[in-house]
Image (cartoon, rainbow, N blue to C red):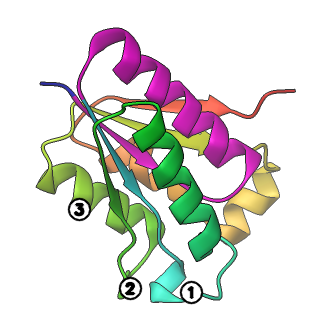
């Protein structure tokens, strides 16, 4: 069975990543694992999905008949590290992440979780842009 892991953030890019992965699971079968975390486990960080958003996403996946698992670790080091650790834990066949446009200077100063996942993953990674 194929396992697709999605690094989810509550943004249009995160929703696009989930939509891509759901379509792949519905088309090819398999299981979906969603991972969401704040930076250093902070639930105040904008990347940490609020409970209503996270629960709504779980309800939608259940209603759509998608076999899924939701992970929202409380003691996360970084979103990229959590995605990579979860991918190894579930033997993910594919990782899907949302990608937002950033300037080269922004990438230099802020680092990039997406870049770390792309470079360090042990399986293929699909980077999905938000719809225009």
Give the Cα separation between the discs numbered 3 and 1: 19 Å
Q: Earlier in the sequence, mark 3 or mark 1?
A: 1
Identify residue for label 1.
Answer: 43
Q: Where does the image place residue 84, in percent across and percent down from the top left? A: 29, 56
Mark 3 lies on a secondary structure that is helix
Residue 96 or residue 108, whichever sits in front: 96
Q: What is the magenta range?
A: 3-30
Front residue (pair 95, 21):
21
> In this rendering, does residue 115 appear at all?
no
Rendered-image quadrant of the C terminus: top right
| Along the line of sight, the residue nearer the viewer: 89 or 33 | 33
Q: Is residue 85 above or below residue 29?
A: below
Circle 1 residues within 10 Å: few <14, some 14–19, many ≥20 = some
Write the residue at 72% across / 54% down: 11
The residue mark sitting in front, 2 or 3, is 2
C-beta proximity under 8 Å, tags 2 and 3: no
Circle nearer the N terminus (2, 1): 1
Quadrant the N terminus occupies: top left
Question: Where is residue 63 drawn, in percent x and y?
Answer: 46, 37
Residue 20 makes an appearance in the image: yes
User: Which secondary structure lies at badge 2?
Assistant: loop
Which residue: 57% across, 74% down?
A: 51
Read off the residue under disc 3.
Answer: 85
Instruction: Confirm whether the magenta stretch covers residue 8.
Output: yes
The answer to whether residue 65 is left or right of residue 8 is left
Q: Position of residue 23 (x, y in %)?
A: 48, 20
> Which residue is labeled 2 in the image?
74
Q: CA distance from mark 2 to mark 1?
A: 8 Å
Image coords of residue 93 (percent x, y): 21, 30
- Mark 2 near mark 1, Cβ–Cβ under 8 Å? yes
């Amino acid at each position: 069975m194929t396992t697709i892991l999605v690094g989810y953030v509550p943004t249009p890019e995160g929703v696009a990543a989930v939509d891509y992965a759901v379509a792949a699971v519905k088309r090819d079968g398999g299981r979906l694992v969603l991972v969401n975390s704040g930076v250093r486990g902070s639930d105040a960080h904008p990347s940490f999905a609020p409970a209503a958003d996270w629960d709504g996403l779980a309800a939608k996946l259940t209603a759509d008949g998608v076999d899924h698992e939701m992970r929202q670790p409380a003691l996360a080091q970084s979103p990229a590290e959590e995605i990579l650790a979860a991918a190894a834990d579930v033997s993910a066949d594919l990782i899907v992440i949302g990608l937002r446009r950033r300037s080269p200077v922004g990438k230099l100063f802020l680092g990039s979780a997406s870049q770390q996942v792309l470079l360090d993953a042990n399986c293929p990674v699909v980077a999905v842009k938000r719809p225009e």
